[in-house]
Image (cartoon, rainbow, N blue to C red):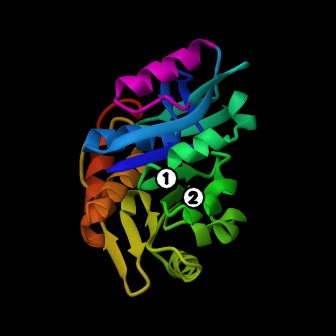
Amino acid sequence: MRIVTVGDNCMDVYRSSGKACPGGNPVNVAVYLTELGAETAYIGWVGNDRYGEIMVQAIRGKGVDTSKVSVQEGRTAVTYVDMVGSERKLGDYEEGVMADFALNSEDLRFTESFQLVHSAIWGHADSYFANFKEKGLLTSFDFADKLDHELVTTLTPYVDYPFLSYTQDDEHIRRLMREIKDRGSKIVVATLGENGSLAYDGERFYKHGITEVEVVDTLGAGDSFIAGFIYGILKGLPVAACLEQGADKAAKTISYFAAW
């Protein structure tokens, strides 16, 4: 199983302690997939600063292929995190060198050796998804909670496994999931926080609850769910089992501090 993730990375800096931890959806998904047993690579840009060094060393240390991580003149992206109890609240985001991120022809050729490519809404990789599909890659994309973003309409025809973040199982999210499926996605997934998750394959909706654990830090919960679900899909598991695997992976992540 070979998966490449593309796009944003950032250092999660906790305001209360000043502790800085590597993160960003594509980075986190790659790390979590590696933990599950997949072979992964990450393509992105970091700055030529200390945070950039930490990012690359940390990702590589987790077993992710970093050969296509490019060091650019400037600052590595930073997200400031506040903790309210065990809940993380994301604050200011400084995009740094990732603001100008783009794939070159060598990067695109590199992706062709993988089964699936994953990115996210802040990753600056959406313009390449038509190319990924043309080359026969499976695709997944995290739209987070930006349900009204134009990419939910324009990009989903090229996304096999779109992930949405919402709060509850209601007609609004079900209607949106049906619309996305009708554009060509294989399975549409919505994470619902403490209300579990929901998936739609065009024939029926599947619903799964959360795996109960003592919550330490919710950072990375959604990303780890995505990794668990994707891993299950590529292993050929039924949709319900993929939701369960996503929930179990998320539960493990929220039981410790920081994303990984």
Q: Local crowd at mark 1 within 10 Å, few (<14), some, or many (≥20)?
A: many
Q: Is residue 65 above or below residue 6?
A: above
Q: Main secondary structure of the magenta part?
A: helix
Most distant residue in the right direction: 100
**Left or right: where does residue 102 sit relative to residue 30?**
right
- Where is mark 1, residue-wise? 117
Residue found 32% across the figure and 60% down from its top: 234
* Relative image position of residue 95 (x, y in whole percent): 70, 33
Residue found 68% across the figure and 66% down from its top: 148
Q: Nearer the viewer, residue 244 or 99?
A: 99
Q: Does dot 2 land on a helix, a strand or a loop?
A: helix
Q: Is 56 in the magenta?
A: yes
Q: Quadrant of the C terminus?
A: top left
Q: Distance between the residues labelled 1 and 2?
A: 8 Å
First in sequence, mark 1 or 2: give its number.
Answer: 1
Q: In this view, does 149 lie above or below 56?
A: below
* Relative image position of residue 110 (x, y in whole percent): 52, 43
Most distant residue in the top direction: 50
Q: Is 127 in the magenta?
A: no
* Relative image position of residue 2 (x, y in whole percent): 37, 48
Which quarter of the figure has residue 179?
bottom right
> At label 1, which amino acid type do we have?
Val
- Where is mark 2, residue-wise? 132
> At label 2, which amino acid type do we have?
Phe
Q: What stretch is highlighted in magenta?
A: 49-68
Any part of residue 218 in sight: no
Is there a contact, CB below 8 Å, between mark 1 and mark 2? yes
* Relative image position of residue 103 (x, y in whole percent): 66, 42
Q: Is residue 37 above or below residue 206?
A: above
Residue found 24% across the figure and 46% down from its top: 213
Any part of residue 226 in sight: yes
Q: In this view, does 188 lie above or below 96?
A: below
